[in-house]
Amino acid sequence: MSKADAKSKDVTPRMLELLRAPVVTEKSTLGSQYGQVTFKVPLDATKPEIRAAVEAIYKVKVTAVNTVTIKGKTKRFKGILGQRSDIKKATITLEKGQNIDIGTSV
């Protein structure tokens, strides 16, 4: 095993920080038919980092990582303006035949 392979297998604290929470919505659960899983990730997370984290933590092969940044809405509470936080979501497509059970924790 080369050094690059050994590094990709080790789970670092940054990798655990990247996958904050699974997104459980109707749309994200429909993606499970196609081998897709959606996670909330930090705004500064990159696609290669997310790919490495999923492969190291869940021991699966990732074919694609798609990300979307959702800007926070401006909301009003008792006449006072507030701002929701921006959110970044990553949709991970897994190789055929592999899956991640998000019902169980890491």
Image (cartoon, rainbow, N blue to C red):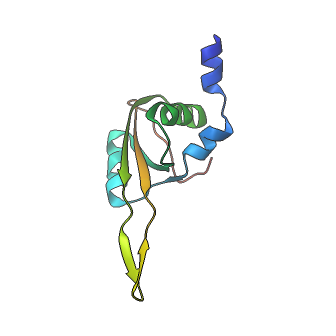
Residue 11 in the image: x percent, y percent?
Answer: 66, 33
Residue 15 in the image: x percent, y percent?
Answer: 60, 38
Q: Please give left or right for residue 42 compared with residue 80 in the image.
A: right
Q: Please give left or right for residue 59 compared with residue 84 in the image.
A: right
- Figure check: 27 above or below 54: below
- In the rendered image, the quadrant that contains the N terminus is top right
- Figure check: 93 above or below 1: below
> Among all residues in the image, which is located at the extreme front?
80
Q: Please give left or right for residue 16 compared with residue 100 in the image.
A: right
> Among all residues in the image, which is located at the extreme top?
2
- Residue drawn where x is 44% and y is 34% of the image: 47
- Residue drawn where x is 39% and y is 87% of the image: 79
Q: Please give left or right for residue 81 compared with residue 106 in the image.
A: left
Comparing 37 with 72, the one in front is 72
- Residue drawn where x is 58% and y is 51% of the image: 104
Residue 52 in the image: x percent, y percent?
Answer: 53, 30
Residue 82 in the image: x percent, y percent?
Answer: 43, 75
Comparing 85 with 68, the one in front is 85
Count of numbered badges drawn on the protein: 0
> Among all residues in the image, which is located at the extreme bottom?
78
- Residue drawn where x is 36% and y is 67% of the image: 73
